Image (cartoon, rainbow, N blue to C red):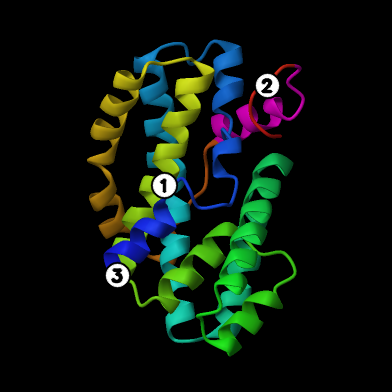
Amino acid sequence: MRLARLLQLASPALPVGAYSYSQGLEAAVEAGTVGDAASAGRWIGDALDFSMARFEAPALCRLHSAWQSPDYEEVRSLNSWFCATRETAELRAETLQMGYSLRRLCAALGEFDLRAVETLAGIEEVAFPTVFAFASAQWALPARDTLVAYLWSWLENQVMAALKAVPLGQTDGQKLLLRLGDRLALIADQALGAEDSTLANFAPGLAIASSMHETQYSRLFRS
Protein backbone atom coordinates (compact mmCIF):
# COMPACT_ATOMS: atom_id res chain seq x y z
CA MET A 1 0.00 0.00 0.00
CA ARG A 2 3.00 2.35 0.21
CA LEU A 3 2.87 3.08 -3.51
CA ALA A 4 -0.86 3.77 -3.32
CA ARG A 5 -0.35 6.18 -0.40
CA LEU A 6 2.47 7.92 -2.25
CA LEU A 7 0.31 8.33 -5.35
CA GLN A 8 -2.49 9.68 -3.17
CA LEU A 9 -0.22 12.38 -1.72
CA ALA A 10 1.10 13.38 -5.15
CA SER A 11 -2.26 13.26 -6.90
CA PRO A 12 -3.79 16.43 -8.39
CA ALA A 13 -7.01 15.19 -6.75
CA LEU A 14 -5.53 15.98 -3.32
CA PRO A 15 -7.95 18.70 -2.10
CA VAL A 16 -5.44 21.40 -1.19
CA GLY A 17 -5.96 23.86 -4.05
CA ALA A 18 -2.51 23.55 -5.62
CA TYR A 19 -4.02 23.93 -9.09
CA SER A 20 -5.10 27.49 -8.29
CA TYR A 21 -1.53 28.86 -7.99
CA SER A 22 1.10 29.59 -10.65
CA GLN A 23 4.00 30.76 -8.39
CA GLY A 24 4.89 33.70 -10.64
CA LEU A 25 4.50 31.84 -13.93
CA GLU A 26 1.38 33.78 -14.92
CA ALA A 27 3.19 37.07 -14.29
CA ALA A 28 6.08 35.85 -16.45
CA VAL A 29 3.59 35.16 -19.24
CA GLU A 30 2.09 38.63 -18.83
CA ALA A 31 5.56 40.20 -19.00
CA GLY A 32 6.44 38.25 -22.16
CA THR A 33 9.21 36.25 -20.50
CA VAL A 34 7.28 33.05 -21.15
CA GLY A 35 5.41 32.70 -24.41
CA ASP A 36 5.92 29.21 -25.82
CA ALA A 37 6.90 25.68 -24.85
CA ALA A 38 10.63 26.40 -24.90
CA SER A 39 10.44 29.45 -22.64
CA ALA A 40 7.97 27.71 -20.33
CA GLY A 41 10.42 24.84 -20.01
CA ARG A 42 13.26 27.23 -19.15
CA TRP A 43 11.16 29.04 -16.54
CA ILE A 44 9.89 25.91 -14.83
CA GLY A 45 13.31 24.24 -15.07
CA ASP A 46 15.01 27.21 -13.45
CA ALA A 47 12.46 27.29 -10.63
CA LEU A 48 13.06 23.58 -10.15
CA ASP A 49 16.86 23.92 -10.08
CA PHE A 50 17.28 27.20 -8.18
CA SER A 51 14.39 27.09 -5.71
CA MET A 52 12.93 23.61 -5.29
CA ALA A 53 16.19 21.65 -5.53
CA ARG A 54 18.35 23.99 -3.45
CA PHE A 55 15.90 24.75 -0.68
CA GLU A 56 12.38 23.31 -0.64
CA ALA A 57 13.40 19.70 -1.25
CA PRO A 58 16.07 19.70 1.50
CA ALA A 59 13.59 21.41 3.83
CA LEU A 60 11.04 18.68 3.17
CA CYS A 61 13.71 16.06 3.84
CA ARG A 62 14.46 17.60 7.25
CA LEU A 63 10.76 17.83 8.12
CA HIS A 64 10.24 14.19 7.20
CA SER A 65 13.12 13.15 9.46
CA ALA A 66 11.79 15.26 12.34
CA TRP A 67 8.31 13.69 12.10
CA GLN A 68 9.81 10.20 11.93
CA SER A 69 12.02 10.64 15.02
CA PRO A 70 9.68 12.10 16.35
CA ASP A 71 11.15 15.47 17.32
CA TYR A 72 8.22 17.85 17.60
CA GLU A 73 10.29 20.83 18.67
CA GLU A 74 12.35 20.40 15.51
CA VAL A 75 9.16 20.18 13.46
CA ARG A 76 7.95 23.51 14.87
CA SER A 77 11.34 25.13 14.32
CA LEU A 78 11.60 23.92 10.72
CA ASN A 79 8.04 25.00 9.99
CA SER A 80 8.72 28.53 11.25
CA TRP A 81 11.97 28.63 9.29
CA PHE A 82 10.26 27.55 6.08
CA CYS A 83 7.46 30.12 6.46
CA ALA A 84 10.04 32.85 7.03
CA THR A 85 11.74 32.03 3.72
CA ARG A 86 8.67 32.77 1.60
CA GLU A 87 9.77 35.82 -0.40
CA THR A 88 6.36 37.36 -1.08
CA ALA A 89 2.95 37.63 0.56
CA GLU A 90 1.56 35.53 -2.29
CA LEU A 91 4.00 32.64 -1.79
CA ARG A 92 3.48 32.73 1.97
CA ALA A 93 -0.30 32.73 1.60
CA GLU A 94 -0.04 29.79 -0.81
CA THR A 95 1.93 27.49 1.49
CA LEU A 96 -0.22 28.40 4.51
CA GLN A 97 -3.52 27.83 2.68
CA MET A 98 -2.36 24.50 1.25
CA GLY A 99 -0.91 23.46 4.61
CA TYR A 100 -4.16 24.31 6.37
CA SER A 101 -6.20 22.35 3.83
CA LEU A 102 -3.99 19.26 4.00
CA ARG A 103 -3.98 19.37 7.80
CA ARG A 104 -7.78 19.34 7.83
CA LEU A 105 -7.75 16.35 5.50
CA CYS A 106 -5.24 14.47 7.67
CA ALA A 107 -7.37 15.06 10.76
CA ALA A 108 -10.48 13.86 8.94
CA LEU A 109 -8.83 10.64 7.78
CA GLY A 110 -8.59 9.48 11.40
CA GLU A 111 -5.76 6.99 10.97
CA PHE A 112 -2.70 8.81 12.28
CA ASP A 113 -1.00 8.82 15.70
CA LEU A 114 -3.04 11.00 18.06
CA ARG A 115 -0.09 12.82 19.62
CA ALA A 116 1.36 13.60 16.21
CA VAL A 117 -2.02 14.89 15.04
CA GLU A 118 -2.30 17.07 18.15
CA THR A 119 1.19 18.44 17.54
CA LEU A 120 0.26 19.27 13.96
CA ALA A 121 -2.98 20.91 15.09
CA GLY A 122 -1.04 23.06 17.56
CA ILE A 123 1.07 24.76 14.88
CA GLU A 124 -0.69 28.08 14.33
CA GLU A 125 0.60 28.72 10.80
CA VAL A 126 1.51 25.46 9.15
CA ALA A 127 3.37 25.24 5.83
CA PHE A 128 2.41 22.75 3.14
CA PRO A 129 5.74 20.81 3.26
CA THR A 130 5.28 20.37 7.03
CA VAL A 131 1.97 18.58 6.56
CA PHE A 132 3.11 16.66 3.48
CA ALA A 133 6.07 15.34 5.47
CA PHE A 134 3.75 14.52 8.37
CA ALA A 135 1.47 12.35 6.20
CA SER A 136 4.42 10.65 4.57
CA ALA A 137 6.10 9.84 7.88
CA GLN A 138 2.85 8.57 9.38
CA TRP A 139 2.39 6.24 6.42
CA ALA A 140 6.04 5.11 6.78
CA LEU A 141 6.93 6.22 3.26
CA PRO A 142 10.67 6.43 2.49
CA ALA A 143 12.18 9.92 2.43
CA ARG A 144 13.54 9.61 -1.11
CA ASP A 145 10.21 8.44 -2.53
CA THR A 146 8.48 11.25 -0.64
CA LEU A 147 10.82 13.81 -2.18
CA VAL A 148 10.27 12.52 -5.72
CA ALA A 149 6.49 12.52 -5.21
CA TYR A 150 6.53 16.06 -3.80
CA LEU A 151 8.69 17.34 -6.65
CA TRP A 152 6.51 15.57 -9.22
CA SER A 153 3.37 17.13 -7.74
CA TRP A 154 4.95 20.59 -7.93
CA LEU A 155 6.17 20.01 -11.48
CA GLU A 156 2.80 18.76 -12.67
CA ASN A 157 1.06 21.83 -11.23
CA GLN A 158 3.54 24.14 -12.94
CA VAL A 159 3.08 22.43 -16.30
CA MET A 160 -0.70 22.55 -15.90
CA ALA A 161 -0.42 26.27 -15.15
CA ALA A 162 1.61 26.71 -18.34
CA LEU A 163 -1.03 24.84 -20.33
CA LYS A 164 -3.62 27.36 -19.17
CA ALA A 165 -1.64 30.60 -19.09
CA VAL A 166 0.71 30.44 -22.11
CA PRO A 167 -1.31 28.50 -23.41
CA LEU A 168 0.31 25.21 -24.44
CA GLY A 169 -1.12 22.05 -25.96
CA GLN A 170 -1.38 18.78 -24.10
CA THR A 171 1.45 17.21 -26.10
CA ASP A 172 3.81 20.09 -25.24
CA GLY A 173 2.86 19.62 -21.60
CA GLN A 174 3.68 15.93 -21.66
CA LYS A 175 7.01 16.61 -23.32
CA LEU A 176 7.85 19.07 -20.54
CA LEU A 177 6.91 16.53 -17.88
CA LEU A 178 9.11 13.90 -19.50
CA ARG A 179 12.10 16.19 -19.88
CA LEU A 180 11.96 17.92 -16.51
CA GLY A 181 10.78 14.79 -14.70
CA ASP A 182 14.08 13.15 -15.55
CA ARG A 183 15.77 15.52 -13.07
CA LEU A 184 13.70 14.58 -10.03
CA ALA A 185 15.56 11.47 -8.86
CA LEU A 186 18.90 13.29 -8.85
CA ILE A 187 17.40 16.29 -7.06
CA ALA A 188 15.98 13.97 -4.40
CA ASP A 189 19.37 12.31 -3.89
CA GLN A 190 21.09 15.68 -3.58
CA ALA A 191 18.46 16.92 -1.11
CA LEU A 192 18.99 13.90 1.13
CA GLY A 193 22.69 14.71 1.41
CA ALA A 194 22.50 18.51 1.44
CA GLU A 195 24.42 20.31 4.18
CA ASP A 196 22.80 23.23 5.99
CA SER A 197 25.46 25.57 4.65
CA THR A 198 24.48 24.80 1.04
CA LEU A 199 20.78 25.62 1.34
CA ALA A 200 19.75 28.72 -0.59
CA ASN A 201 16.43 30.11 -1.75
CA PHE A 202 17.94 32.84 -3.92
CA ALA A 203 15.71 33.18 -6.98
CA PRO A 204 15.07 36.94 -7.33
CA GLY A 205 13.35 36.67 -10.71
CA LEU A 206 10.79 34.28 -9.24
CA ALA A 207 10.19 36.58 -6.27
CA ILE A 208 9.74 39.63 -8.52
CA ALA A 209 7.29 37.75 -10.74
CA SER A 210 5.31 36.64 -7.70
CA SER A 211 5.21 40.22 -6.37
CA MET A 212 4.01 41.53 -9.72
CA HIS A 213 1.32 38.86 -9.86
CA GLU A 214 -0.15 40.13 -6.58
CA THR A 215 -1.35 43.28 -8.39
CA GLN A 216 -1.78 41.92 -11.92
CA TYR A 217 -5.05 43.26 -13.32
CA SER A 218 -6.30 40.15 -15.11
CA ARG A 219 -5.26 36.70 -13.94
CA LEU A 220 -6.39 33.09 -13.95
CA PHE A 221 -4.53 32.06 -10.82
CA ARG A 222 -4.96 32.92 -7.18
CA SER A 223 -3.02 35.76 -5.59
The mark tally for this picture is 3
Q: Mark 2 or mark 1, which has the lower sequence index?
A: 1
Q: Nearer the viewer, mark 3 or mark 2?
A: 3
- The image's mark for residue 153 is 1
Question: Quick one: SS at disc 2?
Answer: loop
Q: Residue at x 67, y 60 (%)?
A: 100
Relative placement, left or right, of 1 versus 62 is: left
Q: Is residue 213 one of those drawn in magenta?
A: yes
Is 195 or 157 nearer to us in this picture?
Answer: 157
Disc 3 from disc 2: Cα separation: 38 Å
The quadrant in which residue 144 appears is: bottom left
Quarter of the image for the N terminus: give it. bottom left
Q: Residue at x 76, y 17 (%)?
A: 217
The residue that label 2 is drawn on is: 219
Question: Quick one: SS at disc 1?
Answer: helix
Tag 3 and tag 1, C-beta contact below 8 Å: no
Query: Is any atom of residue 96 visible in this view?
Result: yes
Residue 195, given in percent of the width and then of the height, sits at 38, 65
The residue that label 3 is drawn on is: 2
Relative placement, left or right, of 187 versus 150 is: left
Disc 3 marks which amino acid? Arg
Disc 1 marks which amino acid? Ser
Q: Residue at x 42, y 30 (%)?
A: 159
Residue 140, given in percent of the width and then of the height, sits at 35, 77
Disc 3 from disc 1: Cα separation: 17 Å
Residue 161, given in percent of the width and then of the height, sits at 50, 28
Magenta segment boundaries in residue numbering = 204-217
Examine the residues drawn in magenta and state their main secondary structure.
Answer: helix
Q: Is residue 218 one of those drawn in magenta?
A: no
Query: Is any atom of residue 193 visible in this view?
Result: no
